[in-house]
Image: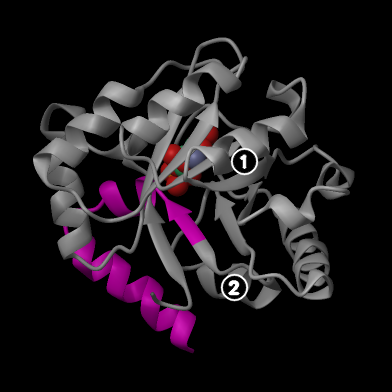
Amino acid sequence: MNDFLIAPSILSADFARLGEEVANVLAAGADVVHFDVMDNHYVPNLTIGPMVCQALRNYGIEAPIDVHLMVKPVDRIIPDFAKAGASIITFHPEASEHVDRTLQLIKSEGCQAGLVLNPATPLHHLDYVMDKLDVILLMSVNPGFGGQSFIPHTLDKIRQVRERIDASGRNIRLEIDGGVKADNIAEIAAAGADMFVAGSAIFGKPDYKAEIDKMREQLAS
Ligand code: DX5
Ligand code: ZN
């Protein structure tokens, strides 16, 4: 696995050709498929569910699928996603009545587990659950839509979470989602992130490989 993971968000892909789009972006050098699940309740948009995740697996997609649940309630959909081939499942603490139980449920289904913090969600949600986290996902936009601008104060939050991860001594991925592109990825990495979701920045361009290469060059500099 690369030290820095690039996870294109398929929210900005062409859904009419989803299998092909995902295969193309992986062939272009992406590490992980970021799969945004929205329920028109927890967030004001409606996307895709476990059937589509299974369809990608049936199509032959073998890369890790990173399921970002923006749904409430969250627990009842987790086993379905695990069966459908999810590798990582993350959820928002506001969407779960029992965060510790939800994390345990994800792990008992054989997936990696993560919490997602919105731009205005405080870091104390990480207290007492660090030992159960494989991923911490910081939102750098308000969830619901692709193509929004990166909220600058997220950088400070990334630094604080990086300190917490290092202090925990655990191998927890720090993932950033929203407004990530080649011209801010270096700064985001310097703050401590090591997994980068990018939707519009990749799928909005004609040449996915050129865009991913540009991101990797920035990460190497
Ligand atoms: C927003 C989603 C993101 C979104 C990112 O709620 O969680 O994954 O697709 O899109 P960009 O990269 O265009 O900001
Ligand atoms: Zn997302």
- Expressed as whole percent of the image width and height from the top left, the position of residue 212 reads 30, 67
Give the residue number, with chain letter if any, for mark 1.
Answer: 141
Disc 1: residue Cβ within 8 A of ligand 1's nearest atom: yes
- Expressed as whole percent of the image width and height from the top left, the position of residue 83 reads 34, 31
Q: Nearer the viewer, residue 99 or 182?
A: 99
Q: Residue at x 64, y 64 (%)?
A: 172
Looking at the image, residue 201 lies above or below residue 145: below
Magenta-highlighted residues = 196-221
Instruction: Indicate the amino acid at tag 1.
Output: Val
Give the residue number, with chain letter if any, for mark 2.
Answer: 189
Looking at the image, residue 128 lies above or below residue 49: below
Instruction: Name the residue furthest front.
Output: 108
62 left or right of 12? left
Q: CA distance from mark 2 to mark 1?
A: 17 Å
Instruction: Name the residue furthest bottom.
Output: 221
Judged from the image, the secondary structure of the residue bearing numbered disc 2 is helix
Q: Residue at x 35, y 56 (%)?
A: 32
Disc 2: residue Cβ within 8 A of ligand 1's nearest atom: no
- Expressed as whole percent of the image width and height from the top left, the position of residue 7 reads 39, 56
> Which is more N-terminal, label 1 or label 2?
1
